Amino acid sequence: MNNIDGQLREIIPRLRRFAVSLTRNPSSADDLVQASLERALSNWSAKRPEGDLRAWLFSILYRQFLDAHRRSRRYARMLEFFTGRDDAQPSVERTVIAQSTLQAFDQLNTEQRALLLWVSVEGLSYKEVAEILDVPIGTVMSRLSRARQALRQLSDGEITRPSLRRLK
Amino acid sequence: MISLPPNERDLHAYVDHQLSDADRHQVEIYLAGNAEVAAQVRAWQQDAQQLRAALSGALQQPANPQLDPALIRQRLKRQSRRHLASAAMLLIAVSVGGLGGWHAREMTLVSPPLPMADAMQAYRLIAQQGMLPADYQVSDDGDMQGWLDRYFSQAHRLPNLAGAGYKPVSGRLLSTEQGPAAMVVYEDQGGHKVSFYVRPPGPKNFLLPRGSRSDGELQAEYWSDAGYNYAMVSPSDTPAAQILKQTLKF
């Protein structure tokens, strides 16, 4: 037990970093990490003994994030339905000239951020990423390639537009 | 083994150190002779490098004690106990409701359900049989009133029974058909127990006139205020029961 907790403690800073990159908000990131740890500890038997603990935790956190995201979108839609307005829409649209890699990174979509963090920053293998996303390795590689191109373009300072701009 | 020229995936795999040594070597030889591709690969490597640098600060956040695995384990344990407890409480509700329901067939028009039957059931289960662990135990610096206030705002203050030698020792949350309830157990030096029980009056807002009744070996004093129904339960015909009667005259 103590051994497991020791391993977890070492990974927690990485989980928090991943969570921040997904949520872009430190306090909801920690909520996400907490929920993920709770889930991991209560489903410990679901972890494959030979599997990498870090990759397993990343995958739990990623799924939790997607679920919460879906829920909050549903909630936003419900709110919109009742109040007739859309509070979830950011007030100022982000039309940004990316000046740094980090700003460019922040503009990528969720999956692209996760992919680059797992592969470029955390050094997970393609196979581990394929298992997290539950897609073939070839798919991981082509998505990674697209994510890299996108990051490259944004870092080069090209002006980007939100691809799904709402017409009002 | 990859074939030359390397395709784009091979190049990404090269950037990500996911090629075998032999393949890696092949790619390096190829890049040495193809400046344009080499520049592209270098740009990806730089992006990755910059991303690592930019995100390295995020690893240095001060630790958040809420995320400590030992604490999370404790929380999970408490939660599962609470789940178990609500399952047990469901049983109480069923047995109270079931009994009431059975009699109710004949007596609906005759008498309303017995007041605060759940408070007496809870006393039996918790104080007498010790079936449910406490959610909250008073330690030296413990504050039972504070604990209760977290769940029941503006409820009647816990009666002070210190004069009779009774002190609050533990608290427990319960779920009942009328809503969430809490029971605080008082104990004296001799281990005698009395309970203070609070819950909402239920969907029908069933407020109670001040009263007292006994059921088997137990006796309950009950009353309501604007927000909640209350009961204090003790074994009948004991000094404690007398004390409750005295104390609750206000």
Image (cartoon, rainbow, N blue to C red):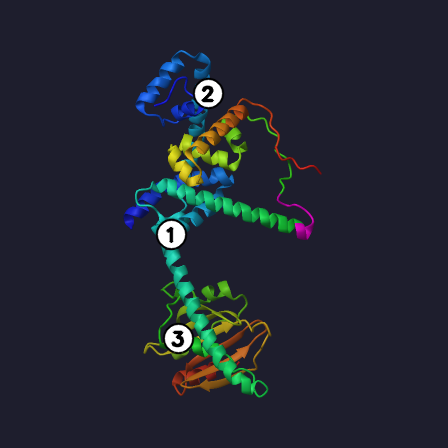
* Disc 1 with disc 2 on a shared chain: no
B127 versus B106 height, above or below: above
B53 versus B29 height, above or below: below
Q: Residue B14 location in percent, x, y?
A: 38, 23
User: Which secondary structure, mark 1?
Assistant: loop
Q: Residue furthest right?
A: A168
Query: Residue B65 vs residue B205: left or right?
Result: left
Q: Chain of mark 3?
A: B
Say the numbered circle drawn on residue A99. none
User: Which secondary structure, mark 3?
Assistant: helix
Does the segment drawn in magenta span residue A118? no
Q: Chain of mark 1?
A: A
Q: Separation of disc 2 and disc 3 at Cα? A: 70 Å
Q: Which residue is mark 3?
A: B125
Q: Which amino acid does the dot numbered 1 rest on?
A: Asn
B119 versus A157 height, above or below: below
Quadrant of the rendered structure where residue B88 is?
bottom left
Say the numbered circle drawn on residue B43. 2
Q: Residue B225 location in percent, x, y?
A: 57, 75
Mark 2 vs mark 3: in front: 2
Q: Which residue is mark 1?
A: A43
> Over which residues does the magenta segment extend?
A81-88
At horizontal 35% and vertical 79% (from top left) the residue drawn is B192
Who is closer to the viewer here, A47 or B5? B5
Residue B159 can be seen in this image:
no
Density class for disc 2 (Cα within 10 Å; few <14, some 14-19, many ≥20) is: some
